[in-house]
Image (spheres, rainbow, N blue to C red):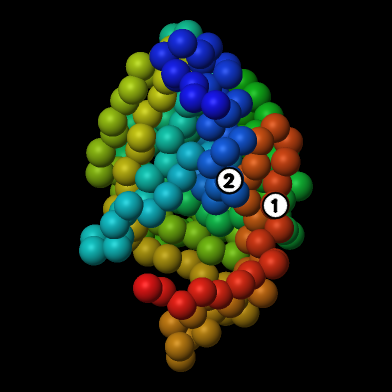
Amino acid sequence: MILNPHEMSQRDRYKLTTGAIVPRPIAWVSTVDRDGNLNVAPYSFFTCVSTDPLILMFAPQSPAAGQQKDTYYNVLETGEFVINIVNEETAAAMSKTAALLERGVSEFDYAGLTPAPSQAINVPRVAEAPVAFECTLQQVITFNNMQPGGGAAVFGLVQHIYIRDDVYDAEKKYVLLDKLQPIGRLSGNGYAHINDIFELERG
C-alpha cells in the first residue's frame, strides 16, 4: 500500500505516524512561567540531536487553532526547561500530568509530584524522576504553529544532568537499564516496557 500524506487528513497522518514510529521516548518537561507557576507535561516527539554540544529536542504540537501548550509559552518566557526521564515507577504520575489544566495551575500539585532544585537553572526537576537534563533554550523552529497538528521543535543545550546513583555505573559510564526501567510511548493510550533486549554485532 502506498499512501500520499498530502491526501490524508491531519488526524489520519497523526494516527499513522504515532502508530508506526514506536516506541518513542518520553520527555517529561518541567517549566516555570514568568509568575513562578510550575508546569510539567509529557512529550513523546523527543530525541537527542547532538552530543557535542549536548542538545536535546522536544516538539509540542498545537492542541487547537491559535493555541500552543503552556510548556511552549513558558520556555519562550524564561529560556529554561528540564527534561525528566519517565520510567515504570513514574508512569502513572506522568500520565496524570497530561491533563488539560488551566494556565497557571501546577501539574506538580495535581499529580502529587515533588519539585527539586536544579543546579544550573531556575526551573525545578521532578524529584521522582531517575534522570533529569537541565536545559537552556537554543532555538525554536515552528511548523504551521498555532494550527492543529502544527507545532514547534524546541532545542535545548544541556547545562547539568541529574542521574540517580542506582541507575548509573559511574566507573563504566553506563546507564543500567534494568534499574532505570524506562517506558516507551505507543499510539493511543499504549505504552511499552523496555525489558526484552537483544544485541547484534554491527556491520
To which residue does mark 2 refer? 22
Query: In which quadrant of the rendered view does residue 100 lie?
Result: top right
Total marks drawn? 2
Give residue 43's position: percent from left, percent from top.
53, 39
Residue lying at 35% horizontally and 38% vertically, measured from the top left = 154
Q: Which mark is residue 66?
A: none
For mark 1, does the 10 Å Cα neighbourhood hold few (<14), some (14 to 19), or many (20 or more) residues? some
Q: Are marks 2 and 1 in contact (CB under 8 Å)?
A: yes
Amino acid type of disc 1? Ala
To which residue does mark 1 refer? 192
The span from disc 2 to disc 1 (Cα, nearest Å) is 9 Å
Depth check: give the residue in front, 185 or 126.
185
Amino acid type of disc 2? Val
Q: Is residue 135 visible?
A: no
Q: Residue furthest front?
A: 1
Tag 1's secondary structure? strand
Tag 2's secondary structure? loop
Placement of the C terminus among the 4 image quadrants: bottom left
Vertical position of residue 26 compared to residue 167: above or below = above
Vertical position of residue 144 compared to residue 160: above or below = above
Depth check: give the residue in front, 8 or 79.
8
Give residue 51's position: percent from left, percent from top.
29, 63
- Left/right of residue 23 with respect to residue 7 in the rendered view: right
Q: Is residue 159 visible?
A: yes
Vertical position of residue 87 compared to residue 36: above or below = below
Residue lying at 76% horizontally and 47% vertically, measured from the top left = 92
Q: Residue furthest bottom?
A: 171
Depth check: give the residue in front, 158 or 52.
52
